[in-house]
Image: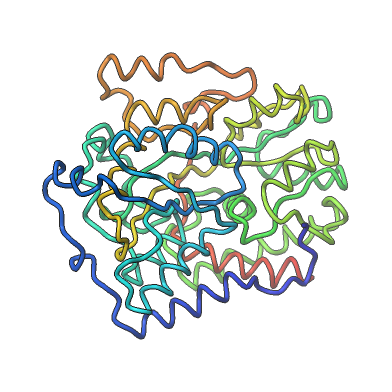
Amino acid sequence: MTIPRRRRPTLAVATAAVSLLALAGCAAPDASSAEAYTDWDQVLEDARGQTVQLWMYGGDDQGNAYVDDVLAPAVAEYGVTLERVPVTDTRDALNRVFTELQAGRDDGSVDLVWVNGDNFRTGKEAGAWRCGWTGLLPSMANTDPDDPLLQSDFGTPVDGCEAAWHKAQFTLVYDAAAVPDPPTTLAGVLDWAAAHPGRFTYPAPPDFTGSVFVREVLASVSGGADAVPTAFSQDAYDELTPALWDRLASLAPNLWRGGDTYPANESELGQLFADRQIDMTMTYGPATLTGLVADGTYPADTRVLTLEEGTVGNASFLGLPVNSDAAAGAMVVADVALSAEQQAKKAEPDVWGQFPVLDLGALSAEDRALFDALPSSPVVPSYDVLSRNAHGELAAEWVPALDDGWRQNVLSR
C-alpha cells in the first residue's frame, strides 16, 4: 500500500496519544512495585516455566525466523518459552502496555518490546518501562559501558530501562548498472534524483526509514549533522526546517509517480527497487542486501552508497514493561539475546545480518572467534566502513515534530 498525498494522521499515532494522556491521569505501577532482583540465580529460578511474549515488528521475515528458530530454542534451555507477537508498528505494543496499565493490571500481556527512539521515550516518560534491571544481566559485561549508542537512545538516557539488542546504520543503496557514476554526498543524491525523474523515492514518515531519510536531509541542508542541535527546541525547528521543506517539496515532482504517492514502508520501497522501478533504495539493515542479491531479488549490480559526510547510526533494544508477569523470563531472554553466541549467530547474513552491540575487543578469544568467522559480503562493506563519519540520532522529540512537519509541508503541497 502506497501513501498518497494529503494523508491523514494514522490511527496508531492518534491512539498512542490518547493512551498516553489517559495513562498520565492515573496511577501507573512503579517499577519498584515489581519484585526487585539482586541475584541472577534467583532470576533463573523464577524464570523456569514462564512464557515470555516478545512484541516486535512482524514485517521482517529474517527477524521472525531468527526469533522463532534460533533465539526461542536457546532460551528454552533455561525453561523459558518465548512467543513472538508480530505487530505492524511498535506503537501497537506500547498502546497495549498503556491500556493495561490504565486498567491497573499487574499481569500485563507484553513482556518484552523491540524498541528504540520515540517509543522508548514515550514509554519512559509514562513510567511504562521497568528500569535498573539490565546491570544484572551477565552478558552486559561484554558491552562497552562508554558506548554512546548504548547509553542514550535518540537523546533519552537508557538508565537500565532497556537491554541493547543490535546496532543499525542507515544506508543508501543503488544499482550500479543504472547509476554508473553515483553521487558521494546526500546533496548529490538529491540532485541526481532531480535529474532522473521517477527513479527515486523514499517511504512516507512516520515509517522509521522515511523518518530517518528526512532527518538526513535536514542535516544536509543545514550544513552538516553538527549544525542541527541534538536536543529539540521550537526555535531550532523554526530556524532549520524551512530549507528542509523547500528542498523536499521541490524534489517531490521528480520522485517516483511524480511524488503523488509514497511507499508506506521500507519493504514497499525495496520492492520498487527489486522491480527496477527505481534505481536507489535505503535501509537500516544493510546486511540483508547480501541475500537479496544472491537470490536474484535485487539487481546483481546492487551496491552500498557510502556518503562522505556519513549517515545516522543507532541501536535498538529490548524493553521490559513494568507490569509484565514474566519479568524473570524476560530478563533471561534479554541476557541470552545479548550473549556472544546469539549476537554472532544473528550477525550471519543468511540468519538476520544485524550488527552486534558487543565490545568485540573485550571478548574472550573463543567468543571473538565467532565473529572473526563471519563471512564477508561482496555487496556490503564491514560495519567499520559503513559507520565511518557516522553521526548519532537527534533527540526523540525531533521525530514526531519532523514527521508532522513533513505531512503538512511536503505531503499536502
Q: Is residue 233 left or right of residue 135?
A: right
User: Considering the image in quadrants, where does the C terminus appear?
Assistant: bottom right
Query: Image quadrant of residue 124?
Result: bottom left
User: Considering the image in quadrants, where does the N terminus appear?
Assistant: bottom right
Q: Residue furthest left?
A: 38
Q: What residue appears at the point 31 percent right and 30 percent down from the top-left corner? A: 359
Residue 328 lies, in percent from the top left, at: 25, 50
196, above or below 174, in the image: below
Colour style of the rendered protein structure: rainbow
63, above or below 1, in the image: above
Q: Is residue 80 left or right of residue 394?
A: left
Residue 25 lies, in percent from the top left, at: 36, 85
Q: Is residue 331 left or right of residue 250?
A: left
Query: Image quadrant of residue 222?
Result: bottom right
341, above or below 8, in the image: above
Query: Image quadrant of residue 264?
Result: bottom right
Residue 374 lies, in percent from the top left, at: 47, 18
Total numbered labels: 0
Q: What residue appears at the point 40 percent right and 34 percent down from the top-left corner? A: 73
